Amino acid sequence: IENGTRAIVMSGAHTASGRGITSIQYNPAGITHVSGTELFYSQSNYIVGITKNVLGYGLKLSPYDYFGMNLFYLNSGDIEVTTERTPTGTGEMYQVLNLCLSTAYGRKVNDNLRLGATVKIIREDIYTAYMNSYAFDFGGMYTFKPPVLVLPKLTVGVSFSNIGPEVKFYGQGLDQTVSTSLSVDEKLSRVSESFQLPMVLRVGISTQSPLNIAGNSLLVALDLVKPDDSFASLNSGFEYSWNDMVYVRSGYHLGHDSAGFSAGFGLKWGAVEFDLAYTDYQVFSSTNFSSPYQMGLIFSF
């Protein structure tokens, strides 16, 4: 699930174009673009009533070292408990909760090369079952300087996400009450098998117009995303800016299982930036599900 309002509206094409604390999900090397201290908060109304919130903090430790933290929290909303005997619902409700706390470090090797790494603590609760684990992300960015000033710079980014051990669910939700003829303690436990977190490879390129005419600038980005348990998708993103104050953005997911076109804008005044994004999840467009939108605030100082 994409994070960061700017990234969302650019369809997640952020491996090479990411800037600051909001980019570490896509490429932890992007944190090396923090200019001083950066705070970020995002609230999203996702599909089918799912909500997610992101809180981020980035800090420039030195001209070459950068640090950041990112807290991701997702709530499915109320889901009705059903059983074989009561398929229409028992009247009891439960929720699916996801929590991910990321700590990132970035290193600006030189003006061309930037590297980063993230360690993540992951928690998932489904009714009365839960899973705890950790994982690592690694990434880098390299900017090719053009031989002629009028030519655009080209940045290439690569990242690997969710590198970690196998995980497994535990908890009371795996226990099932049975008769004493099956178990003397009237309980059987379901077998929870271990599984691997979905590792993701991202390769991206971005380029920005070299000429800033009357404050106008254009950024174009393209990402190839390949999870190891699913098919590859191609994400494209565009960002037009005027005087580094007004931003108009759009993107498109090609090969994605549900997301299509995205659009939004950003307004920056001094140290504060407000961003709004909307993504068309095509598979839900003909239903009564709520429209997915995202709002974000960035404070830089």
Image (tube, helix red, strand yellow):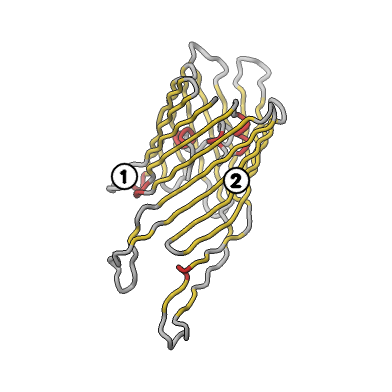
Labelled disc at residue 290: 1
Labelled disc at residue 157: none
Q: What is the quadrant of residue 45 in the picture?
A: top left
Residue 9 image offset from top left, x and y in percent: 44, 34
Mark 1: few/some/many CA within 10 Å (<14, 14-19, 20+): some
The three-letter code of the residue at mark 1 reads: Ser
Q: Is residue 2 above or below residue 149?
A: below
Q: Element type at marker 1?
A: loop
Q: Element type at marker 2?
A: strand
The residue located at (36%, 41%) in the rendering is 292
Residue 271 image offset from top left, x and y in percent: 50, 23
From the viewer's perspective, is 210 left or right of 214? Answer: right
Residue 90 image offset from top left, x and y in percent: 30, 67
The single residue placed furthest to the bottom in the displayed view is 181
Quick one: 92 or 28, which is closer to the camera? 92
Residue position marked by numbered label 2 in the rendering: 201
Q: Is residue 40 above or below residue 289?
A: above
The residue located at (41%, 51%) in the rendering is 75
Quick one: 40 or 295, which is closer to the camera? 40
* Residue 282 makes an appearance in the image: yes
The three-letter code of the residue at mark 2 reads: Leu
Residue 248 image offset from top left, x and y in percent: 43, 25
Pair 2/1: label in front: 1
The single residue placed furthest to the right in the displayed view is 109
